[in-house]
Amino acid sequence: MTRREFLNLATVSCTSATAMVTPRRPNILLILADDLGFSDIGCYGSEIETPNLDRLARRGVRFTQFYNTARCCPTRASLLTGLYPHQAGVGHMVNTGRPDYPGYRGDLSPRCVTIAEVLRSAGYRTFMCGKWHVTPVSESKHNWPLQRGFQRFYGTIHGAGSYYDPVSLTEGNEPAKPDRSEYYYTDALAERAVQYIREMAGKTEPFFLYLAFTAPHWPLHARETDVARYLGLYKQGWDALRQERYRRMVELGIIERRWQLAPRDPRAPAWDEAPHKEWQVRRMAVYAAMVHAMDRAIGRVLEALERSGAYEDTLIMFLSDNGGCAEELGPKAQGLHIPRLTRDGRPVRVGNLPEVMPGPEDTYQSYGLAWANLSNTPFRLYKHWVHEGGIATPFIAHWPRRIRRAGVVIHHAAHIIDLMPTCLDAAGAKYPSERQGTPVLPLEGVSLLPLITGEAALDERTLYWEHEGNRAVRQGRWKLVSRHPGTWELYDMEADRTETNDVAAQHPDRVREMAALYEKWAARCGVEPWEKVRPPK
């Protein structure tokens, strides 16, 4: 699909079926995907059908250099607070918390405040559906959604689990169970979001809805009707599809032609030499079906907004928590997220076993490194790492009443710490100096509304990352990055965003200057050496 064809696709009518009193301030719908790669949706070059996200992109704006923090827990902490993850207490994962290190306690810090807390105090109704994952699953509920500003919650506290029987499923503060035999978590989240939107129809208060899907995070679970539409497509393999995505991304203006496609990960075989092709095709087909199902669920939420009359004055934002996930699940994998039995009593077959075709409720697999390499086209590496494949996310912003430049592609670098100030700016809400008597840290991000609406440009600034010892600094066209335990690499993002030509040796002074900036940031934000805080195996 060419860029011209994308922009000329027919738009869907936004006429309201029922009137709703337009709030003085916009509603805000923040949608987060889980483990979705940079090029996994249609308007960013994918072969996966995502008509509803594509529609948002046609009427809104797309960012090409928007960044998350490379992992689920840290990204969610930053999204909710407008701080770097270590400042919010979640520098690593909630199940590996180190209470002796404030940046790695694995639990939202009392020195941060959430978007929901601020917007609720400003008169918004606050709702959440989906994955929380910023506090451990325990008897203590001090950092659960209802204790962190949300008035209604339906979702999971834990970070992964079966789509047919999700672990830690919760409604409000109480445990919940799947309510039907054909239960599928992605659909259930959309249904609850639709319910919340309908409840707000006709009310004068604006609402904030945080819709955090687990899709397409493993396990590979999807309905067979959705899987079937993709089985033929993936028979051509990851090598051909990476080339196809790259070409479409150039045509769409998402990447520049002068950036070469990063080479296939050397750990992945050429498709022609890959064993178990039927199983490999099935893995990616199920993954694509999960993305497709998520897009369909988003469509149901958009339809509810239209019917309520809220669509035109709702700021909608969509992004992913990290890049594609290369994690392989072995047959001995264990954890709270893996059920022993299905709901009807069958043993769950765990692990990436080629003799087991993923998708049904009694399987538990991931799609693996080679397909994650496709998801992150044209970049290197994956979730966990802070090279572009780990931290680059699609980001769509849609607000018909304010965005006048439909379909514009924005190349300014932005970060997930910017979502809190963007929401507060749109709502006219003030960031507090304290929470329940405890001083809170000042915001790290900036509002993106001037960029989103086209009203003004933003100054360049320096952005930072650290996860599991992987480090990065982005300053204008330059990115300094290190894959733990390696040395610093330097890339010119204007000439080489796919990070294929390390120019550190040619610019030693710049490397030293940017490394010094990183060390100052790390000291200020509570970043510790990975060897010091690494959880025991």
Image (spheres, helix red, strand yellow):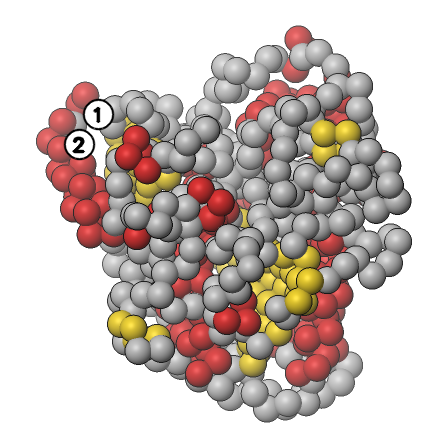
| 149 shown above or below 59 | below
- Occupied quadrant, residue 36: top right
* Residue in the image at 72% along x and 41% along y: 339
Left or right placement of residue 201 versus residue 316 in this view: right
Amino acid carrying label 2: it is: Val
Outermost residue to the top:
273
Residue 49 seen in this snapshot = no
Query: Tag 1, which secondary structure?
Result: helix
- Occupied quadrant, residue 313: bottom right
* Residue in the image at 65% along x and 54% along y: 168
Q: Position of residue 494 (x, y in %)?
A: 32, 38
Query: Tag 2, which secondary structure?
Result: helix
Q: Residues within 10 Å of mark 1 (few under 14, many from 20)?
A: some
Q: Which residue is mark 1?
A: 504
Label for residue 511? Answer: 2
Left or right placement of residue 58 versus residue 148 in this view: right
* Residue in the image at 64% along x and 70% along y: 172
Proximity of marks 2 and 1: CB atoms separated by less than 8 Å? yes
| 372 shown above or below 116 | above
Q: Position of residue 469 (x, y in %)?
A: 32, 34
| 471 shown above or below 131 | above
Q: Residues within 10 Å of mark 2 (few under 14, many from 20)?
A: many
Amino acid carrying label 1: it is: Ala
Residue 34 seen in this snapshot = yes
